[in-house]
Amino acid sequence: MSEDVHICHCNGITKGEIAKAIKEKGLTTADEVSDETSAGEVCGGCVSDIEEILDEVNG
């Protein structure tokens, strides 16, 4: 999945923005990602994608 892919369509957050926040802030949960980036706060439809990115970045 490209870094430019929009993960959260409601708030216009890309995979790259989410991955960067995870790396820089040491985020480990979808709630932490939402608090930091606003991804997943509106409809919640992207939470599974956020969790997938968390797994990818954090191993």
Image (spheres, rainbow, N blue to C red):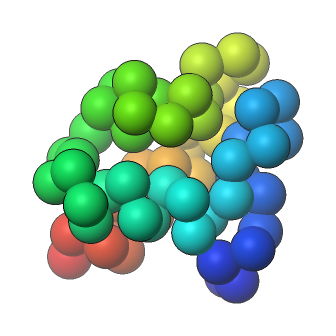
Task: Residue 2: give x, y in percent of width and height.
Answer: 70, 83
In the picture, measured across the screen, residue 4 lies left or right of residue 49, that is right
> At 68% across and 58% down in the image, what residue appears?
14
Task: Residue 8: give x, y in percent of width and height.
Answer: 72, 42
Displayed quadrant of residue 43: top right
Task: Residue 29: give x, y in percent of width and height.
Answer: 27, 39
Displayed quadrant of residue 42: top right
Q: From where the camera sits, is residue 55 visible?
A: yes
For the residue pair 9 and 21, the one nearer the viewer reads as 21
> At 55% across and 59% down in the image, what residue appears?
17
Residue that lies at the very extreme toward the bottom in this rendered image:
2
Task: Residue 21: give x, y in percent of width and height.
Answer: 37, 54
> At 41% across and 65% down in the image, what residue appears?
20
Residue that lies at the very extreme toward the front in this rendered image:
24
> At 57% across and 69% down in the image, what residue appears?
16
In the picture, measured across the screen, residue 58 lies left or right of residue 37, that is left
- Quadrant location of the C terminus in the rendered image: bottom left
In the picture, measured across the screen, residue 38 lies left or right of residue 56, that is right
Q: From where the camera sits, is residue 52 visible?
A: no
- Quadrant location of the N terminus in the rendered image: bottom right
